[in-house]
Amino acid sequence: MRLYDSIGPNPRVVRMFLAEKGLRLPVQRVDLAAGENREAAHLVRNPYGQMPTLELDDGSFVSETVAICEYLEEVQPAPALIGSTTQQRAETRMWRQRIDLNICQHIANGYRFSNGLKRFESRIVCVPEGAEGIKKIAADRLRWLDGQIAGKKFLCGERFTVADIVLYCWVDFAGQVGQPLDEANSHIAAWFARVATRDSVAA
C-alpha cells in the first residue's frame, strides 16, 4: 500500500490513525498549495481531486478519509479504533458521523469561504457571504458537544476511537484558521488536552 498525503486535517486523520495502529506505509506527498491534487496524475487516483488517497497492493485506489480508516481497520483490527464488537462499531460511527456533518464540514467551509477564499475560489464553488454564519453553526454544534462529552474520557467513554481523531484534527485546524475553541467549552478543552498527550498527534 501507499499513502498519498498532504497538508490539511483529513490527511492528518489518516496519519494519526496509522500511528495509533503502529502501521507504516510508503508516503508520497501531494502539494495542495500548488494545486497538484487537481492535476491529471492525481485525478487518476481520485477523480474528485481530494486528499488523502490510499493506493492498494493491486494498484486500485481508496479515497475518502473514513473509507481509508475503515479499510485499515479491517486489514489490522487491533488495536480497535472503530470497534471490536457490533455495538462498539455502531457507537463509534454514530459519533464520527455527528462530528463530521455537524462540526467538521462547517469548520471547513467557514475556512474555505473566508481565510482560504483565495486558494479555493478557483477550485470549488465558494459562498463568502455565508462564511460567518457557517462558523456560527460550527460553534453552536461544539457547544452542544461540550455537554455531551461531560464526564467522559473520550467520545465513546473509555475507548479512544477514530471519532476522537477526527474531532481532534479539526478542532486543532480550526484554531489555526481563525476559529478558536470557545473557552467556555471546558469539557472539550479537557478532552483536547488529553488527546494532545498521545504520541500519534505528531504524525
Image: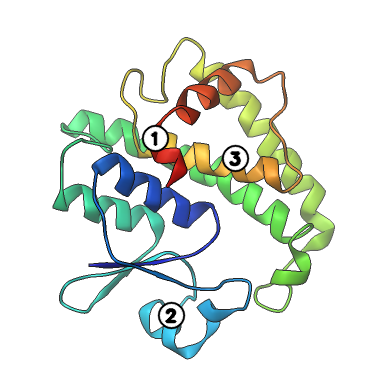
Residue 150 numbered tag: none
Q: Amino acid at mark 2?
A: Pro
Name the amino acid, label 3. Answer: Asp
Against 154, residue 79 (above or below) is below
x and y percent of residue 90 in the render?
A: 28, 35
Q: Residue at x 77, y 65 (%)?
A: 117
Please provide percent x and percent y for residue 64: 39, 61
Marks 2 and 1, how far apart at CA: 33 Å
Q: Which residue is mark 2?
A: 47
Label 3 sits on residue: 172
User: Is the N terminus in the top left, top right, bottom left or bottom right quadrant?
Assistant: bottom left
How far separated are the C-alphas under marks 2 and 3? 28 Å
Pick the residue in front: 51 or 86.
51
Please name the residue that numbered disc 1 is placed on.
Answer: 199
SS class, disc 1? helix
Query: Would you identify the image quadrant in which residue 137 lies?
Result: top right
From the viewer's side, name the closer residue of 196 and 182.
196
**Tag 2: Cα neighbours inside 10 Å, few (<14), some, or many (≥20)?**
some
